[in-house]
Amino acid sequence: MSDVAQPVLYSADGPVARITLNRPDKRNALNDELIAGIKDSLRDANRDERVRVVVISGAGKDFCSGADLSALQKIAGASVAENQDDARSLMELFLILRQVEVPVVAAVQGRALAGGCGLATACDLVLASSSARFGYPEVRIGFVPAMVLAILRRNVSEKNAFGLITRGEQIGAAEAKRIGLVNEMFSEDTFASDVDKYVEGFSETSRSAVALTKKLLYQIDGLDLEAALEAGVDVNVIARMTEDCKQGIAKFLKK
């Protein structure tokens, strides 16, 4: 099968796994095949012990424009049960992004809108080109960015989340960075090399330590202080028992 026919491209080069949304003629719009391809690629990356970071990007000018026309037509004519299955498929994608042990980075150029913005928001880190655009326009067609709200609310303030999802307007990369939706903004001209340099930093980190850190960070979302500290005690003890930690301490003591 040629690359053009594949909705998602996957490659792993040492510590960096790359997932490319490959529907540039459709602005990488989401459909069942694309969502399934992202899930499969994330699972492949998670099984690969060499991988330290996953980068998701879009082929062509845009990251992802949200659901495509056929998906919207399917929603319009579907039964309650069919719509529930469809929504749960997207929910599963958001959960897998959190369950992957290594950091998942969205490298956003062009537009990340609706479900595409949700996909970027659901990643652990977001890197944006200076000309990138973000937005949740669902309310303009009577729809609700319902599942991503659980993630968006954890990324930005309540007031900023409310404005984004109820006005349906697009914002630029600089504004997205200001409100906490984006981690870093890079120049359009050097975006690819800047992303490579950023993710290279993960090749120097301990896979087990990052995996434990990621799991703990998201685990404490719904915990009170004492429970969060107790969870931290458990992870602290587990980390001390890993080979990475033992070797790291031994190396440090030799200095």
Image: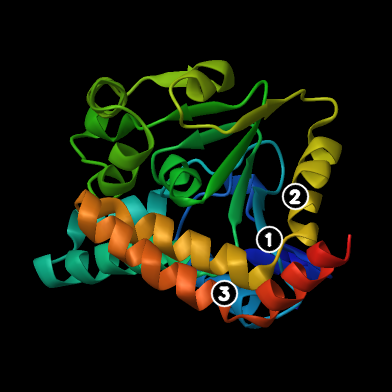
User: In the picture provided, is 126 more to the left or to the right than 218?
Assistant: right
Instruction: Pinpoint residue 200: horizontal percent, then vertical percent.
Output: 81, 52
Amino acid at pointer 2: Val
Q: Which element carries disc 1, helix, strand or loop?
A: strand
Q: Residue at x 24, y 27 (%)?
A: 158
Scheme of colours in the image: rainbow
* Other-residue count near label 3 (Cα within 10 Å), few / some / many at <14 / 14–19 / ≥20: few
| Circle 3: residue type | Arg
Q: Mark 3 to mark 2: distance in Å?
A: 26 Å
* Cα gap from disc 3 to disc 1, whole angstroms: 23 Å
The picture quadrant where one finds residue 164 is top left
Give the label on residue 29, or none.
none
Q: Earlier in the sequence, mark 2 or mark 1?
A: 1
Residue 222 position, x and y percent, is 22, 54
The answer to whether residue 161 of the structure is visible from this angle is yes
* Local secondary structure at mark 3: helix
Residue topped by disc 3: 240
Q: Earlier in the sequence, mark 3 or mark 1?
A: 1
Disc 1 residue crowd, few under 14, some 14–19, many 20+, Cα 10 Å: many
Q: Which residue is mark 1?
A: 53
- The C terminus, quarter of image: bottom right
Residue shown at 26% from the left, 43% from the top: 149
- Determine whether, in the image, residue 215 is placed left or right of residue 25: left
Location of residue 63 with respect to 50 vertically, above or below: above
Per the image, label 2 sits on a secondary structure element best described as helix
**Who's the residue at 59% across and 63% down the image?**
210
The amino acid type of the residue labelled 1 equals Val
Residue 134 drawn above or below residue 122: above
Tag 3 near tag 1, CB within 8 Å: no
